[in-house]
Amino acid sequence: MQILDWAEYEHKMRKRLSQVPDFRVIVVDGTPGFLVPRSCVKANHKKREITWEAQLEILGLHGFLLVETGKRKKKKLTLPLCLVSREGRALVSLLLNTVNNEGQGRFLLAFDVGEGTVVAEITLDLKPLVVVYLMSTLMPTLEEFRMAPDCPFCENEK
């Protein structure tokens, strides 16, 4: 964890948001997920399986799911979370509903392979997101930490 000054925060936000691919939010049996282009994921398409590592990064009222797919050759994928917009908060709420007693939550990562869709269930530590979610609902925040110009969720809110 580190405290960023305003310039560092803006730089990191721009960098992360520039890494976000086109995606669609999906929900399967109450579990939220992201449908991304096939080119964003390194997977064994014949066996329809994905090897992955995931972590969460929080920047103000935005979070990023950082997913690395593949075994030897890897691809990095950045997926946004937003606590500002209604749509973003709904997604985060669904995500937090998957959290177990150890703070582990899950989401789905899906992509089309032509003859169907491959779906992987990704688990990761979501305790920091729980804290930021609670803080954002209980305490007023500085206006400049709210809207992010390039956030796909914030853009829909305008």
Image (spheres, helix red, strand yellow):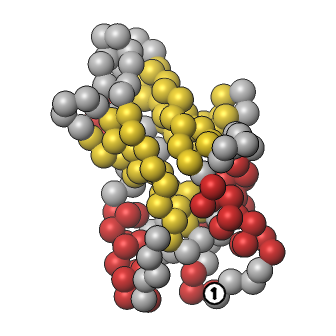
Residue at coordinates 75% horizontally, 83% vertically from top-left? Answer: 140
| Residue 147: quarter of image | bottom right
Residue at coordinates 34% horizontally, 10% vertically from top-left? Answer: 47
Q: Secondary structure at mark 1?
A: helix
Residue 48 sits above or below residue 65 on the image:
above
Residue 52's x, y, as percent?
A: 38, 34
The residue closer to the viewer here, 94 or 103, is 103
The residue closer to the viewer here, 24 or 126, is 126
| Residue 61: quarter of image | bottom right
Q: Is residue 138 left or right of residue 20?
A: right
- Location of the C terminus by quadrant is bottom right
Residue 75 sits above or below residue 91 on the image:
above
For the image, the number of numbered tags is 1
| Residue at far right of view | 138
Residue 74 sits above or below residue 134 on the image:
above
Residue 30's x, y, as percent?
A: 73, 33
Residue at coordinates 78% horizontally, 70% vertically from top-left? Answer: 137
Observer able to see residue 120: yes
| Residue at far left of view | 73
| Residue at which label 1 appears | 143
For label 1, the crowd category at 10 Å Cα-Cα, with few meaning under 14, some 14 to 19 and many 20 or more, is few
Residue 54's x, y, as percent?
A: 43, 44
Observer able to see residue 22: no
Residue 45 sits above or below residue 158 on the image:
above
Q: Is residue 150 left or right of residue 139?
A: left
The residue closer to the viewer here, 43 or 158, is 43
Residue 49's x, y, as percent?
A: 39, 19
Residue type pointed to by label 1: Glu
Residue at coordinates 34% horizontally, 42% vertically from top-left? Answer: 68
